[in-house]
Amino acid sequence: VTYRTFVRLAEVWAALERCAPGYGKRHTRDHFRVTYEGRFYDLSCGPHGDVERAKIFFSDVRKMSRHLQIQDCVIPLLGE
Amino acid sequence: MVMSSEWPLYFTHRESIEGKGYVAQVNMQGRVLVAREPRSDSDLPAWVFYGVQPSSLSAEAESVPAAFALFRERLKDVLFSIADDARDFDEFQAAVRAFFSETDSDADVWVRRAAEVRAGQTVQEMAVSRLPRRVAHEVEPTCSVVNVSAESYRPSPENNVASQIFQTTAA
Protein backbone atom coordinates (compact mmCIF):
# COMPACT_ATOMS: atom_id res chain seq x y z
CA VAL A 1 0.00 0.00 0.00
CA THR A 2 1.30 3.46 -0.89
CA TYR A 3 0.30 6.45 1.19
CA ARG A 4 0.47 10.22 0.63
CA THR A 5 3.04 12.25 2.53
CA PHE A 6 0.78 14.58 4.50
CA VAL A 7 -2.66 14.63 6.08
CA ARG A 8 -4.52 17.78 7.13
CA LEU A 9 -5.00 18.12 10.86
CA ALA A 10 -8.77 18.53 10.37
CA GLU A 11 -8.84 15.07 8.75
CA VAL A 12 -7.03 13.62 11.76
CA TRP A 13 -9.53 15.11 14.20
CA ALA A 14 -12.43 13.80 12.12
CA ALA A 15 -10.91 10.31 12.10
CA LEU A 16 -10.35 10.42 15.86
CA GLU A 17 -13.95 11.54 16.46
CA ARG A 18 -15.08 8.39 14.70
CA CYS A 19 -12.42 5.90 15.81
CA ALA A 20 -11.54 7.10 19.32
CA PRO A 21 -14.72 8.45 20.89
CA GLY A 22 -13.97 10.46 23.98
CA TYR A 23 -10.33 11.08 23.00
CA GLY A 24 -8.56 14.09 24.48
CA LYS A 25 -6.23 16.62 22.84
CA ARG A 26 -4.23 19.58 23.99
CA HIS A 27 -1.64 21.75 22.29
CA THR A 28 1.77 21.51 23.97
CA ARG A 29 4.84 23.20 22.51
CA ASP A 30 5.30 21.83 18.94
CA HIS A 31 2.70 19.10 19.05
CA PHE A 32 -0.76 18.01 20.05
CA ARG A 33 -0.95 15.49 22.83
CA VAL A 34 -3.69 13.02 21.95
CA THR A 35 -4.95 10.80 24.78
CA TYR A 36 -7.17 7.78 24.49
CA GLU A 37 -7.89 4.94 26.91
CA GLY A 38 -4.92 5.66 29.16
CA ARG A 39 -2.37 6.12 26.36
CA PHE A 40 -0.96 9.27 24.84
CA TYR A 41 0.70 10.21 21.56
CA ASP A 42 2.40 13.49 20.71
CA LEU A 43 1.38 14.38 17.17
CA SER A 44 3.93 16.73 15.63
CA CYS A 45 2.43 19.84 14.02
CA GLY A 46 5.44 22.15 13.69
CA PRO A 47 6.48 25.08 15.83
CA HIS A 48 4.87 28.06 14.11
CA GLY A 49 1.81 29.38 12.37
CA ASP A 50 -1.79 28.29 12.42
CA VAL A 51 -1.58 24.84 13.95
CA GLU A 52 -5.13 23.90 12.96
CA ARG A 53 -4.07 24.31 9.32
CA ALA A 54 -0.93 22.27 9.89
CA LYS A 55 -0.07 19.31 7.69
CA ILE A 56 0.78 16.15 9.57
CA PHE A 57 3.02 13.39 8.23
CA PHE A 58 0.85 10.40 7.35
CA SER A 59 3.54 8.21 8.94
CA ASP A 60 2.99 10.07 12.22
CA VAL A 61 -0.75 9.39 12.01
CA ARG A 62 -0.11 5.72 11.25
CA LYS A 63 2.18 5.45 14.27
CA MET A 64 -0.33 7.28 16.47
CA SER A 65 -3.12 4.96 15.39
CA ARG A 66 -0.98 1.87 16.07
CA HIS A 67 0.03 3.24 19.47
CA LEU A 68 -3.57 4.04 20.41
CA GLN A 69 -4.68 0.68 18.94
CA ILE A 70 -7.19 2.22 16.51
CA GLN A 71 -5.34 1.56 13.25
CA ASP A 72 -8.00 -0.74 11.81
CA CYS A 73 -10.45 2.18 11.88
CA VAL A 74 -8.18 5.18 11.16
CA ILE A 75 -6.10 3.94 8.24
CA PRO A 76 -9.03 2.95 5.95
CA LEU A 77 -10.54 6.38 6.62
CA LEU A 78 -7.42 8.37 5.76
CA GLY A 79 -5.52 6.11 3.38
CA GLU A 80 -5.53 6.56 -0.38
CA MET B 1 7.95 1.48 -7.78
CA VAL B 2 9.93 1.35 -4.54
CA MET B 3 8.83 -1.50 -2.28
CA SER B 4 8.48 -0.66 1.38
CA SER B 5 10.81 -2.39 3.81
CA GLU B 6 11.63 -2.06 7.46
CA TRP B 7 14.59 -2.92 9.62
CA PRO B 8 15.15 -3.20 13.39
CA LEU B 9 17.66 -0.73 14.79
CA TYR B 10 18.95 0.32 18.18
CA PHE B 11 19.70 3.87 19.20
CA THR B 12 21.45 5.65 22.05
CA HIS B 13 20.58 9.16 23.12
CA ARG B 14 21.32 11.43 26.06
CA GLU B 15 19.51 14.64 26.85
CA SER B 16 19.70 17.28 29.59
CA ILE B 17 16.29 18.55 30.62
CA GLU B 18 15.55 21.40 33.02
CA GLY B 19 12.50 20.89 35.19
CA LYS B 20 10.90 22.66 38.12
CA GLY B 21 13.84 23.02 40.50
CA TYR B 22 16.07 20.32 39.02
CA VAL B 23 18.18 19.37 36.02
CA ALA B 24 17.72 15.80 34.75
CA GLN B 25 19.99 13.73 32.57
CA VAL B 26 18.00 11.24 30.48
CA ASN B 27 19.93 8.35 28.97
CA MET B 28 18.14 6.07 26.57
CA GLN B 29 19.23 2.93 24.80
CA GLY B 30 16.14 2.17 22.77
CA ARG B 31 14.72 0.45 19.72
CA VAL B 32 13.25 1.78 16.47
CA LEU B 33 11.96 0.32 13.24
CA VAL B 34 13.35 2.22 10.28
CA ALA B 35 11.23 1.95 7.15
CA ARG B 36 11.76 2.94 3.54
CA GLU B 37 8.31 3.76 2.24
CA PRO B 38 7.03 4.85 -1.17
CA ARG B 39 4.80 7.93 -1.33
CA SER B 40 1.88 8.37 -3.72
CA ASP B 41 2.72 12.07 -4.22
CA SER B 42 6.50 11.81 -4.56
CA ASP B 43 9.00 9.97 -6.74
CA LEU B 44 11.33 9.66 -3.79
CA PRO B 45 10.69 7.19 -0.98
CA ALA B 46 10.63 8.46 2.59
CA TRP B 47 12.73 7.19 5.47
CA VAL B 48 10.65 6.82 8.61
CA PHE B 49 11.77 6.08 12.17
CA TYR B 50 8.94 4.39 14.07
CA GLY B 51 9.59 4.33 17.80
CA VAL B 52 9.48 0.90 19.44
CA GLN B 53 10.90 1.76 22.83
CA PRO B 54 9.89 4.48 23.38
CA SER B 55 7.00 3.82 21.07
CA SER B 56 4.86 6.96 21.00
CA LEU B 57 6.75 8.96 18.38
CA SER B 58 7.95 8.80 14.78
CA ALA B 59 10.00 10.93 12.39
CA GLU B 60 10.14 11.11 8.60
CA ALA B 61 12.82 12.59 6.32
CA GLU B 62 14.63 12.03 3.04
CA SER B 63 17.54 10.03 4.49
CA VAL B 64 18.36 7.81 7.47
CA PRO B 65 20.61 10.41 9.20
CA ALA B 66 18.02 13.17 8.64
CA ALA B 67 15.22 10.99 10.00
CA PHE B 68 17.32 10.07 13.05
CA ALA B 69 18.10 13.76 13.69
CA LEU B 70 14.38 14.57 13.51
CA PHE B 71 13.56 11.59 15.73
CA ARG B 72 15.94 12.99 18.38
CA GLU B 73 14.30 16.41 18.09
CA ARG B 74 10.87 14.87 18.57
CA LEU B 75 12.14 12.85 21.53
CA LYS B 76 13.52 16.03 23.11
CA ASP B 77 10.21 17.78 22.52
CA VAL B 78 8.31 15.00 24.31
CA LEU B 79 10.75 15.18 27.23
CA PHE B 80 10.27 18.97 27.39
CA SER B 81 6.51 18.56 27.62
CA ILE B 82 6.87 15.89 30.32
CA ALA B 83 9.02 18.40 32.26
CA ASP B 84 6.32 21.05 31.74
CA ASP B 85 3.77 18.78 33.39
CA ALA B 86 5.87 17.23 36.19
CA ARG B 87 5.75 18.99 39.55
CA ASP B 88 9.17 17.71 40.68
CA PHE B 89 12.01 15.36 39.74
CA ASP B 90 10.32 12.22 41.06
CA GLU B 91 7.26 12.86 38.93
CA PHE B 92 9.42 13.60 35.89
CA GLN B 93 11.43 10.41 36.41
CA ALA B 94 8.31 8.27 36.74
CA ALA B 95 6.69 9.82 33.65
CA VAL B 96 9.82 9.36 31.49
CA ARG B 97 10.13 5.73 32.57
CA ALA B 98 6.46 5.13 31.76
CA PHE B 99 6.90 6.82 28.36
CA PHE B 100 9.91 4.60 27.62
CA SER B 101 8.32 1.35 28.78
CA GLU B 102 4.95 1.58 27.02
CA THR B 103 5.01 -0.46 23.82
CA ASP B 104 2.62 -1.24 20.97
CA SER B 105 2.38 -3.75 18.11
CA ASP B 106 5.64 -2.47 16.60
CA ALA B 107 7.49 -4.19 19.44
CA ASP B 108 6.43 -7.59 18.06
CA VAL B 109 7.40 -6.58 14.53
CA TRP B 110 10.83 -5.43 15.80
CA VAL B 111 11.43 -8.80 17.52
CA ARG B 112 10.45 -10.74 14.37
CA ARG B 113 12.66 -8.60 12.12
CA ALA B 114 15.61 -8.88 14.52
CA ALA B 115 15.20 -12.66 14.63
CA GLU B 116 15.28 -12.77 10.81
CA VAL B 117 18.51 -10.75 10.73
CA ARG B 118 20.10 -12.89 13.43
CA ALA B 119 19.05 -15.99 11.50
CA GLY B 120 21.16 -14.76 8.62
CA GLN B 121 18.81 -12.70 6.43
CA THR B 122 20.94 -10.22 4.53
CA VAL B 123 20.18 -6.51 4.74
CA GLN B 124 20.28 -5.37 1.11
CA GLU B 125 19.63 -1.69 1.77
CA MET B 126 22.98 0.09 1.88
CA ALA B 127 21.75 2.95 4.07
CA VAL B 128 21.04 0.34 6.74
CA SER B 129 23.74 -2.25 6.08
CA ARG B 130 26.55 0.28 6.49
CA LEU B 131 25.42 1.23 10.01
CA PRO B 132 27.61 -0.01 12.89
CA ARG B 133 26.59 -3.35 14.39
CA ARG B 134 25.89 -4.49 17.93
CA VAL B 135 24.94 -7.88 19.27
CA ALA B 136 21.57 -7.95 21.00
CA HIS B 137 22.72 -8.48 24.59
CA GLU B 138 24.86 -5.33 24.38
CA VAL B 139 21.89 -3.12 23.63
CA GLU B 140 18.99 -4.23 25.79
CA PRO B 141 16.53 -1.34 26.13
CA THR B 142 17.36 0.83 29.12
CA CYS B 143 16.32 4.26 30.32
CA SER B 144 17.94 6.08 33.21
CA VAL B 145 16.88 9.44 34.59
CA VAL B 146 19.42 11.08 36.90
CA ASN B 147 19.03 14.24 38.93
CA VAL B 148 22.32 15.96 38.05
CA SER B 149 21.45 18.97 40.20
CA ALA B 150 21.57 16.79 43.32
CA GLU B 151 24.60 17.28 45.55
CA SER B 152 25.44 13.59 45.32
CA TYR B 153 25.92 13.73 41.53
CA ARG B 154 29.55 13.54 40.40
CA PRO B 155 30.13 14.73 36.81
CA SER B 156 32.56 12.67 34.74
CA PRO B 157 33.65 12.57 31.08
CA GLU B 158 32.76 8.87 31.17
CA ASN B 159 29.12 9.91 31.24
CA ASN B 160 29.35 11.51 27.81
CA VAL B 161 27.58 9.30 25.27
CA ALA B 162 27.07 10.13 21.60
CA SER B 163 23.68 9.69 19.95
CA GLN B 164 24.04 6.76 17.56
CA ILE B 165 22.08 4.15 15.67
CA PHE B 166 23.10 0.52 15.30
CA GLN B 167 21.88 -2.52 13.46
CA THR B 168 21.61 -5.92 15.06
CA THR B 169 23.92 -8.73 14.07
CA ALA B 170 23.95 -12.49 14.25
CA ALA B 171 27.19 -12.83 16.23
Image (tube, grey):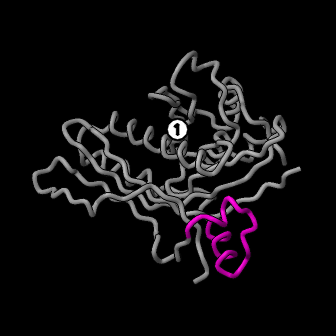
For the C terminus of chain B, the image quarter is bottom right
* Camera-side residue of B19 and B139: B139
Left/right of residue B111 with respect to residue B82 in the rendered view: right
Query: Is B156 located above or below residue B20 in the figure?
Result: below
Q: Is residue B161 magenta?
A: no
Left/right of residue B100 with respect to residue B170 in the rendered view: left
Number of marks drawn: 1
Residue sitting at x 64%, y 56%: B34
Residue sitting at x 17%, y 47%: B149
Q: Secondary structure at mark 1?
A: strand
Query: Is A75 located above or below residue A28 in the figure?
Result: below
- Say few, some or many: other residues with alpha carbon within 10 Å of mark 1 (under 14 / 14 to 19 / 20 or more): many
| Residue at the disc numbered 1 | A42
Check the image and name the residue furthest to the top: A50
Q: Position of residue B16 (x, y in %)?
A: 31, 45
Q: Which residues are magenta?
A: B109-132
Residue sitting at x 47%, y 70%: B139
Give, as a three-letter code, the residue at label 1: Asp
